[in-house]
Image: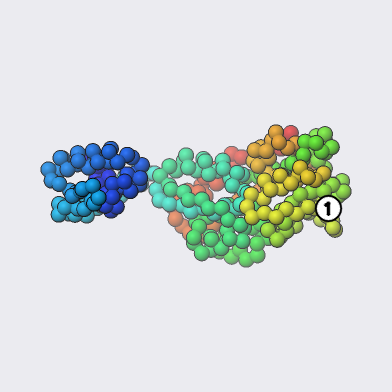
Amino acid sequence: MDLRQVHYFVTVARELHFTRAADVLHISVPALSQQIKALERHLGVQLLSRDSRHVSLTTAGDVFAEFGRRLLQEGEAAVQMARSAGGVIVGQLSIAVLHDAEPAFEPLLTGFHATYPGLEVKVSNQRHVELLASVRHRTADAALSWEFLIEAGGDKSGLGWTTVAPTEVVAGIDVENALAASSRVRRGKPLRNTPAVLFERSYSPVSFDYAVKELYGQDVTDPPVTEVSVTVRAQEAMARRLATTSGLTPLTRPVADLLRGTLAIRPFDPPWFVNGCVVWRRDNSSAPLAALLTAAATHKVSSRPQVMS
């Protein structure tokens, strides 16, 4: 028996409408109708009663719909059991990723998907205050964030985290700005008269204070910062604002690579790196999470800091 035809019939039995069922299955109505007729010929019974307006199940169709659903469920279970027996990890993994940081974790996520194709990975973008709550409340199996945020995040009891790979932070500068002529941008006291564009402090006080310290030094007062109101994609909003300012904005390397050509990108001196990390509940012993941590360890070993030139 063709399980595809069983799947088509079960969908029609649920929707009782060929057009809706065809939309769900992403096929045409004539093609769906032909497959149902082929199944009826194979079984030797009529499964559906249909006219120009209505679709209903025959007695045979009602019985076959129930057993067809079981057949599909058992077929999926058989696939997962075979994969598990062959050493392929299956299941679902929910990952919460910090807004604006996802590009930095893309190599990890891409490699993870290639290594564990049997895992269904669901990724959601959240602000940092939401990330740890998602992990603690088990609405996410793991979170991807910056290590400096984790270290400054207060109560970390019951949580584990591991560094994935350092990500360089560089200066984005408007191409018409005189700063663009420099090969590097010196941080600390030499930068204190240079304005910078950052997201508004209320968006993430910890990140804002961290960026100010890294740009201008530990003891800076009244830094020359223009704050940009954002909800998501803070780095892109900061970069857009550069056209109306005479300063710079700090960008992570993956975001800077996307904006290269529209902005002058210069490395900082000394180099500035932020560590991406994976965060999880220590009492979560699921196989999908263990697979992610294995991938993170492998990615950490294979990754090395690279300073932009």
The color scheme shown is rainbow
Which quarter of the image is occupied by the C terminus? top right
Residue 184 rendering spot, x and y as whole percentages: 80, 37
Residue 292 rendering spot, x and y as whole percentages: 50, 49
Q: How many numbered discs, if any? A: 1
Q: Is residue 118 visible?
A: yes
Residue 15 rendering spot, x and y as whole percentages: 29, 52
Which residue is at 53% across, 60% downward? 135
Residue corresponding to mark 1: 224
Q: Of residues 261 and 18, which is closer to you in this image?
A: 18
Q: Of residues 34 and 187, which is closer to you in this image?
A: 34
Q: Of residues 303 and 276, which is closer to you in this image?
A: 276
Image quadrant assignment for residue 27: top left
Residue 298 rendering spot, x and y as whole percentages: 54, 43
Which residue is at 43% across, 52% downward? 92
Which residue is at 74% across, 41% downward? 172
Left or right of 268, for residue 90: left
Left or right of 110, for residue 155: right
Q: Is residue 68 visible?
A: no
Image quadrant assignment for residue 143: bottom right
The residue type indicated by label 1 comes to Pro
Which quarter of the image is occupied by the N terminus? top left
